[in-house]
Amino acid sequence: MSTEILDRFRPLFEPRGVIIAGASSHPGKFGFVAAHNLLSEGFAGEVFLTNRDGAEILGRKSLTTIDDVPNGAADLVFVCTPQKAVPDLLRTCAAKGVKAAFLTTAGYGELGEEGKRAEDDLVALCDELGMLLLGPNGQGVISTPAKMCAQIVAPFPPPGKIAIASQSGGFVQAFQNYAAKTGVGVSRAVSAGNCAATKIEDYLEYFAADPETAVSLIYVEGLDDGRTFYETVRRATSSKPLVVLKGGATSGGQRAAASHTGALATDDNVFDGMCRQAGMSRATSIEEAFEIAASFATHPIPRGRNVFVLTTAGGWGVVTADRITASRELDLMPIPEDLKAEFDKRLPPRWSRNNPADLAGSETRDTVVECLDLVAAHPDVDAVLLLGVGIQSNLAAMERSGNFYPDHGLERIVEFHERQDTRYAQTAMDLEKKHDKPVLIATELTDCQPENAGPRTLHDAGSLAYASSYRAVTALEHLYRYGQHRSRR
Amino acid sequence: MPELSGAPSHTLSEYESKRRLASLGVPVAAERLASTDAEAARAAQEIGCPVAVKLCGDKIAHKTERNLVRLGVDSAEAARAAAAELLGAARPEDGPVGVLVAQMVSGRRELIAGCVQDPTFGPCVMLGIGGIFAEALADVVFRLVPLSPADAAEMIDSLQNQKMLDDFRGEPAVDRQMLAEVLLGLSRLVESDPQILSVDLNPLIVCEGRPVAVDALIEVRGA
């Protein structure tokens, strides 16, 4: 089963060669952008550009006809031609051994009845040719293991474990931008367009089997066959987490969606229940969707509800306690007595003696690291939130750029501060791995000062730092819920 | 009542609907179907007053709107009078009718449960907070048929107003296992009969912590 699906999608995600049909020398055309992106990002396989006039494109000679492509040299054709040229093009490609066609070409199902007929004909033709049909009306496909950037939008994200399939090209782009920003990378991404033959659930089945993928992230507006989608999702979540963002959840969104992909949105309560039943994490916003997927890609699943908060910033501790207390999934566990006793040995009496453990600015060189170690190692603790990382480097940055640097001992203290934040971040990652439980760091500096040693250390190691503790708690809720789903079934 | 637009359908009588649900483990109020006012009086005596007396027939779907329900009927004699009045109110288009005499089930909390055919996902089971604030609260959850026991338990946990399921104004907490059985019964019912378009258990009264279906209506395909 899994070999079959891997074989079916190999021509799309790991093609030996790619034909850009309708390549153009005009920088404003899709046919130019596609050629540019594929060539400039270093695709490992062969690239063939076809252009009616044989124009030179990006310093390469183009072919005037597919006939000139050697038999079996290309598995994928990326189609940027007008609609009327498509049927002949696909027949010729099939004769050359091409197994998959990605169509950016528009004017199909999204244009109503006549377009729908053209789309049905297209599906029938690809069936006859035994060709995998992607799109039409899609913006492209990327595959980082193959260094393949076959898309007419930016960016090419860093490599990673998140696989994306979306009914909106704009959201593929948005997710890829978040990947570039956070450093939590992407394995495969596809703008599924009209999903004429290949549906979101088909991509999901592939992602579930794909060894390069740890978590799937999808955007859906309309589903042709809800039952098949549900069954596929249920199978997929039994091996890997899956995050969904649904467009058209309200009647206003439904009208916008109907004109967008020509599909009818379903009652949102039913969709929501289906997600829970199938073990799929449903996000409420585009940024949350990426963040949950990135959390699955970089952090382990908590085994239980008990969260412990360690903070060097009092207010953050308080509001985080409020947020966890309001959570239906997580508990702000009372501090275990043995942990309290160990903390007492290391801290002056003014520390909070509770969860959150507010170290109250009493930390010396090793206090944070030692306390974090104790918390993460405690068997009752299922997840740890560390707040206040980066505060020292924030000050260091100000001191470094101030008038007195590097004199008056500033050079030494700046280096010390930055070393400490690096150490906190590194310790969190090490303990997370050692104890196989989430140890999350949340600080506004993730957004406000991305070069800060704290968040930067996580970013460079491909781990996700959170821009606020609320977002970290939301991520933990999703991780916990998925863990529960897996353990109950 | 949700139904697939355009498709012909009809409803089963309340009595028949409840019989089918009861056979799949859904608790329903004790009741008798009577064809005359004398039988209704006897039924009231057997069940114990107070009782509810309702006109019942395959073609009667909107009893409350037509004022065909008498609640809190407190003697056999009153049950006889109510039955006579209701039988007299039957219209020719109602077809064969009887009088349903049912135990009055009392509880402060009402739930609503049922099944619908979703146009995208097919048959679903629904659970919600019922009663006069049902629409304002809009606290409803759905799962697709078939339900597993884990699905049913999670469905109950997913209701927003969990406090309404706990100890409530002197009444014990809702028996979650029994409520889960109601949901699993609905799932089995729809699975066993693809002709079923929708099911309404409204209200599902929480009586001493036990959910009991006080009214039920099954809608099936075909004229």
Image (cartoon, rainbow, N blue to C red):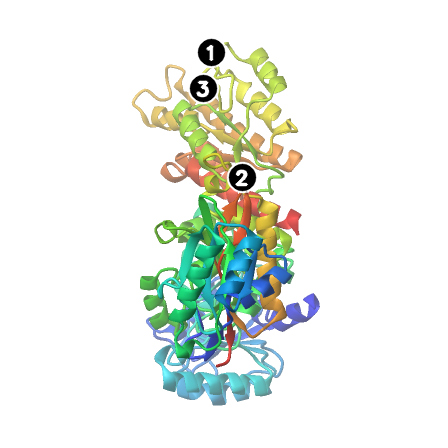
Q: Chain of mark 2?
A: B
Q: Position of residue A146 (x, y in %)?
A: 58, 63
Which numbered disc, 3 or 1, marks the residue that appears first in the sequence?
Answer: 1
Q: Chain of mark 3?
A: A
Instruction: Please state which of residues A5 and A12 is positioned toward the viewer in this rendering.
Output: A5
Amino acid type at mark 2: Ala
Residue A481, relative to residue A430: is it above or below? below
Spatial separation of the CA atoms under disc 3 and disc 1: 29 Å
Residue at 49% x, 24% y is A356
Query: For the view shown, which residue lies furthest in the top direction?
Result: A349
The residue tagged 2 is B173
Q: Position of residue A304 (x, y in %)?
A: 61, 37
Residue B204, relative to residue A477: is it above or below? below
Res A189 seen here = no
Residue at 42% x, 54% y is B71
Q: Quadrant of the N terminus of chain B?
A: bottom left
Q: Indicate the quadrant where residue A443 lies.
A: top left
Residue A350: numbered disc? 1
Q: Position of residue B160 (x, y in %)?
A: 45, 45
Q: Indicate the quadrant where residue A75 lies.
A: bottom right
